[in-house]
């Protein structure tokens, strides 16, 4: 049967629109939500379900029902994602557009409310009597409780709810569209819209959540890759769309200054680029490195900041070369000009110069760090920059010099490089750098590098001072370290820098606060790592760094004196003693010979050792793996046992809690029932329940209490009723005795009062009747003047109506006559048609009778012909039978004669008399008994003959018209009274001249010799006949007639006729 009418989407939509028309939007939403989430809606066509979804999302937006919208959209996605993806995109776009429209309307409404509040405030300001008391207690209290202005409060009350709903809308749509390749474009578009939302309304918290949501979607893409229509990140188009989304995310994070999210976005981009089979476009990579420079600069990681700038500049230079040579497309490469290359070359050099030589508390320029976490972090950052190895300060300067960036950089940047890295001028380094710093500070983009450059300048200052002086005054150092405003450094800052350098091991300076003197460490036995500032573990430089030095320190001299002595003695021996060189050469040759001789053996030993080591490693790894598997198995067993024990404990606790809950619930219900019954008892009767414990009561006890109380109440009531009845009876008797005394007097008073009332009513009735009569008379006189006009008007109306009636009657008579004629004509035609139909039916009946009569005649003729043919066939069969009998008799006589002759010949040959004195007499055909298998017993009442006889009869009937020779008939004609001899079975009554067969006798199964062979009656005779013919040839072939095709069954009534 078809579904109910309300299940169809058209009916549901119509019902929802009717509810919306009567301002019942919530009820309409419930109807639509129930239909959309129902399982029956899965079989509904998409074309009829789409309007329902559009109305559904519109109601959800109007009522801010995000949860209902999410459920319905999930269900609709499951229904339509395999058949029609376009309808999903249409509904989701409508959902987002409506939410954005509501936010815009809320903003306009908030602006209107704010403008009305401001106008009201201006009017109230003009009406204030005391201008010094503009702040009322209400405004002060509100400002104290919430520090917001009136606009903020208005936005929070009006705009913020819709902003929250719009954010939930974006999240819902992204969750619905995730991990579906057919909806991938809509997914990326929605992500971009969500980014624009966060940027437009400065929603930093929502932006973090959005980034995390997208990150989870990409991570789960591998988990659900086996699902239908799942996204494949190996496809270039899908990966390109995800990269564009991540770059948009990176740009928004940069504009919102959310540097942690920006760094995570960079990691996401790097992960996606590693999955890509083709390289990213240069314009995207340029954006990637540019954002990395900002991230590293904000995090005070100047080393990787400089490395990112270096990669960024190299990419720009390669893009410019590719575009100029025509090898690249302009839209795939960033726009690069000479001014831009000069600018970025200056930034590359400046960022490299700003790398601190001595690490600070917030920035560590060292890469050789034993901390594993620091090493892992540096490895991650190096991978983000796609660099083969970690960058160094010296390596960056080497790359800068190799690519000629100094020539392209600004002149002040080149001068700064020469002062810090090439020249040696400890007393004028700050004076020469101050104009350059001032010029750099005027540029807002380069101003960020002034503070790290100060650290580098101070490092170079102390490095160069340590090579010239052993000790200097602190005030002298303060005068040397002079920087332009507003980049001045205080003595405290210088002292802090010195302490930090000493702590990290980059400086070897002692500070005497009493005398204010800085002493550079000149101990010849001091640590070697402090001899070269910038070569310690906390530095970005190493010993090979190009720092200009005038002379070696005493510590260096003491450390290298043995080395210098050994070199000098070696050179002297080579010149003075020739045998020294010969011995050295001989030792070298002997060593080479030993090495050559033992190389093969050592190689074999190394191979054997390597094999042993590999086997031991494999054994160790197998043992470790086996141990781990055993531990894992044991751990899993323990976990399983613990889980089973915990599950059992939880089941027991749950069972006990459930049992306790059931018992408590039963007790509570029982107590409530008892209390209810007791309250009914208290309300219905007066009973004392103060001394009764409710917990001890049950239904039977309450019933006993009720019955006993009812019995008490009944007895009490009966006694009260009896007493009251007796008292009322006595009182009524007393009242009636007293009434008898005053009955007559009271009757008279009543009669007089009734008479007065009657007279008064009579007068009133007469007066009203007279007044009514007078009014009627006056009305008659007034209306009598209108009688003539009324009569004339009435007669005119009657005449006009009569004329109209006559016209209508005549018209009706004419129409009646016409219809009558039409009716008569149609009746006559109908009768004629019926008469014609009757005649036609009679004719068909006569023809049918004639046809049946003709068929009957033909059938009778056919029957007659059939009878004649049957009679002819019978006669022919009788003649054939007589002929066969005669032939059989002759054959038997010949066989008997042949047998007698054979016996005679045997007797003559043996010379003895024959075994039989006389020949065996041949029994006549009438006396012969049939063989045991020759005749079939005949059952009385059953027709003789089987299917063979019937088949032979049909064949004989088919060939019944052929002529037969008359010789047998002529031979049989002289003795018509003698019965012919029969072959086969002979009935007893026909043997030895018996009586002729009657109707009750058994039928004779006469057959030809050929047909009798199957029954065993004539087959031996045929064989004997054949043998006799072959041996003696006594019977000529002309005397033997061929057997006919087969005997026919002849009924007993037709045998022996003619």
Image (cartoon, grey):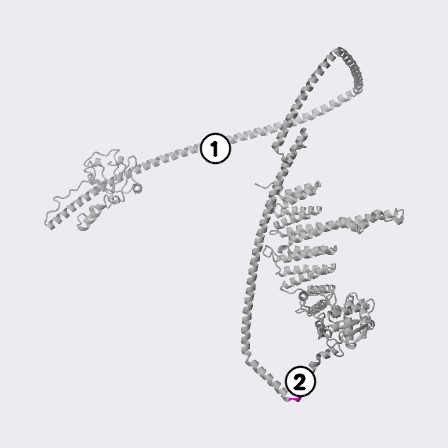
Sequence-first disc among 2 and 1: 2
Residue 719, relative to residue 1027: is it above or below? Answer: above
Q: Secondary structure at mark 2?
A: helix
Image side of residue 446 versus residue 1055, left or right: right
Q: Tell me the CA gap for discs 2 and 1.
A: 155 Å
Q: Secondary structure at mark 1?
A: helix
For mark 2, what is the residue? 570
Q: Nearer the viewer, residue 770 or 238?
A: 238
Q: Which residues are magenta?
A: 568-577
For mark 1, what is the residue? 840
Residue 887, relative to residue 790: is it above or below? Answer: below
Q: Residues within 10 Å of mark 1 (few under 14, many from 20)?
A: few
Q: Is residue 1052 magenta?
A: no
Pick the quarter of the image with the N terminus. Answer: top right
Of helix, strand and loop, which mostly describes the magenta segment?
A: helix
Pick the quarter of the image with the C terminus. Answer: top left
Q: Nearer the viewer, residue 337 or 522?
A: 522
């Amino acid at each position: 049967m078809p579904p109910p009418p309300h299940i169809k989407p058209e009916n549901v939509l119509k019902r929802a629109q009717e509810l919306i028309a009567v301002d019942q939007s919530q009820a309409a939403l419930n109807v639509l939500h129930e239909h959309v989430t129902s399982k029956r809606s899965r079989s509904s066509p998409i074309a009829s379900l789409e309007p329902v979804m559009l109305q559904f999302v519109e109601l959800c937006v109007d009522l801010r029902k995000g949860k209902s919208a999410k459920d319905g959209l999930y269900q609709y996605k499951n229904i339509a994602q395999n058949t029609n993806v376009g309808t999903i995109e249409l509904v989701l776009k409508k959902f987002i557009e409506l939410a954005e429209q509501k936010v815009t309307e809320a903003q306009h409404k908030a602006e209107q409310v704010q403008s009305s509040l401001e106008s009201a405030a201006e009017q109230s300001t003009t009406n204030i009597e005391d201008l010094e008391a503009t702040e009322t207690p209400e405004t002060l209290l509100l400002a104290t409780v919430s520090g917001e202005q009136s606009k903020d409060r208005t936005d929070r009350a009006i705009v913020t709810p819709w902003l929250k709903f719009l954010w939930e809308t974006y999240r819902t749509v992204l969750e619905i569209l995730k991990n579906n390749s057919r909806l991938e474009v809509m997914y990326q578009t929605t992500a971009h819209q969500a980014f624009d939302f966060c940027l437009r309304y400065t929603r930093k918290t929502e932006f973090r959540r959005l980034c995390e949501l997208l990150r989870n979607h990409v991570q789960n893409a591998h988990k659900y890759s086996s699902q239908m229509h799942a996204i494949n990140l190996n496809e270039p188009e899908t990966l390109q769309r995800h990269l564009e989304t991540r770059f948009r995310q990176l740009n928004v994070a940069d504009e919102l200054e959310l540097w942690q999210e920006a760094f995570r976005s960079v990691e996401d981009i790097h992960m996606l680029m590693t999955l890509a089979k083709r390289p990213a476009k240069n314009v995207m990579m340029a954006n990637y490195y540019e954002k990395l420079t900002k991230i590293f600069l904000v995090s005070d990681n100047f080393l990787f900041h400089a490395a990112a700038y270096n990669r960024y500049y190299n990419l720009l230079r390669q893009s410019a070369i590719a575009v100029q040579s025509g090898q690249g497309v302009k839209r795939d490469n960033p726009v690069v000009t000479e001014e831009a290359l000069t600018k970025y070359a200056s930034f590359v050099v400046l960022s490299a110069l700003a790398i601190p030589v001595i690490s600070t508390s917030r920035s560590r320029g060292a890469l050789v760090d034993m901390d594993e976490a620091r090493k892992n972090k540096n490895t991650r950052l190096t991978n983000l920059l796609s660099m083969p190895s970690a960058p160094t300060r010296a390596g960056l300067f080497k790359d800068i010099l190799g690519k000629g960036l100094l020539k392209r950089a600004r002149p002040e940047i080149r001068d700064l490089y020469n002062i810090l890295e090439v020249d040696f001028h400890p007393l004028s380094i700050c004076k020469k750098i101050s104009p350059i710093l001032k010029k750099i500070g005027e540029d807002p983009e380069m101003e960020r590098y002034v503070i790290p450059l100060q650290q580098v300048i101070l490092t170079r200052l102390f490095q160069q001072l340590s090579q010239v002086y052993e000790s200097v005054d602190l005030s002298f150092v303060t005068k040397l370290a002079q920087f332009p405003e507003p980049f001045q450094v205080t003595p405290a800052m210088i002292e802090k820098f010195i302490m930090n350098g000493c702590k990290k091991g980059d400086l070897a300076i002692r500070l005497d606060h009493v005398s204010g003197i800085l002493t550079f460490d000149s101990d010849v036995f001091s640590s070697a790592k402090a001899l070269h500032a910038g070569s310690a573990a906390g530095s970005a430089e190493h010993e090979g760094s190009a720092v200009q030095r005038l002379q070696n320190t005493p510590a260096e001299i003491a450390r290298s004196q043995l080395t210098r002595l050994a070199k000098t003695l070696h050179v002297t021996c080579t010149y003075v003693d020739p045998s020294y060189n010969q011995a050295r050469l001989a030792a070298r040759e002997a060593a080479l010979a030993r090495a050559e001789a033992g190389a093969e053996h050592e190689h074999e030993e190394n191979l054997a050792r390597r094999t042993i080591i590999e086997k031991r490693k494999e054994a160790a790894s197998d043992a470790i793996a086996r141990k781990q598997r055993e531990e894992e198995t044991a751990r899993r067993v323990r976990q399983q046992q613990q889980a089973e024990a915990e599950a059992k404990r939880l089941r027991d606790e749950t069972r006990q809690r459930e049992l306790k809950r059931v018992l408590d619930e039963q007790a509570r219900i029982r107590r409530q029932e008892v209390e209810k019954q007791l309250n009914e008892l208290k309300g219905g009767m007066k009973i004392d329940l103060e001394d009764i414990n409710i917990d001890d009561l049950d239904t039977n006890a309450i019933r006993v209490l009720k019955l006993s109380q009812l019995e008490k109440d009944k007895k009490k009531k009966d006694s009260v009723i009896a007493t009251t009845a007796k008292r009322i009876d006595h009182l009524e008797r007393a009242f009636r005795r007293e009434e008898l005394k005053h009955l007559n007097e009271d009757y008279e008073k009543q009669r007089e009062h009734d008479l007065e009332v009657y007279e008064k009513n009579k007068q009133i009735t007469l007066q009203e009747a007279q007044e009514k009569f007078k009014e009627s008379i006056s009305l008659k006189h007034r209306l009598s003047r209108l009688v003539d006009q009324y009569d004339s008007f009435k007669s005119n109306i009657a005449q006009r109506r009569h004329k109209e009636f006559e016209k209508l009657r005549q018209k009706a008579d004419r129409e009646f006559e016409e219809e009558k004629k039409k009716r008569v004509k149609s009746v006559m035609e109908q009768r004629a048609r019926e008469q014609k139909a009757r005649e036609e039916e009679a004719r068909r009946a006569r023809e049918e009778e004639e046809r049946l009569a003709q068929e009957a005649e033909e059938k009778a003729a056919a029957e007659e012909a059939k009878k004649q043919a049957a009679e002819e066939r019978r006669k022919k069969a009788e003649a054939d039978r007589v002929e066969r009998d005669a032939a059989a008799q002759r054959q038997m006589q010949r066989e008997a004669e042949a047998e007698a002759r054979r016996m005679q010949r045997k007797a003559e040959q043996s010379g003895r008399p024959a075994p039989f004195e006389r020949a065996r007499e041949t029994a006549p055909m009438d006396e012969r008994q049939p063989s045991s298998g020759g005749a079939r017993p005949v059952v009385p009442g059953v027709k003789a003959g089987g299917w063979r006889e019937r088949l032979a009869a049909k064949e004989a009937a088919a060939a019944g018209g052929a002529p037969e020779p008359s010789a047998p008939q002529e031979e049989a004609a002289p003795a018509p009274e003698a019965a012919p001899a029969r072959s086969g079975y002979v009935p007893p009554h026909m043997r030895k001249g018996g009586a002729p067969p009657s109707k009750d006798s058994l039928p004779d199964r006469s057959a030809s010799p050929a047909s009798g062979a199957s029954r065993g009656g004539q087959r031996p005779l045929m064989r004997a006949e054949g043998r006799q013919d072959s041996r003696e040839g006594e019977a000529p072939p002309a005397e033997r007639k061929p057997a006919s095709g087969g005997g026919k069954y002849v009924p007993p009534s037709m045998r022996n006729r003619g």
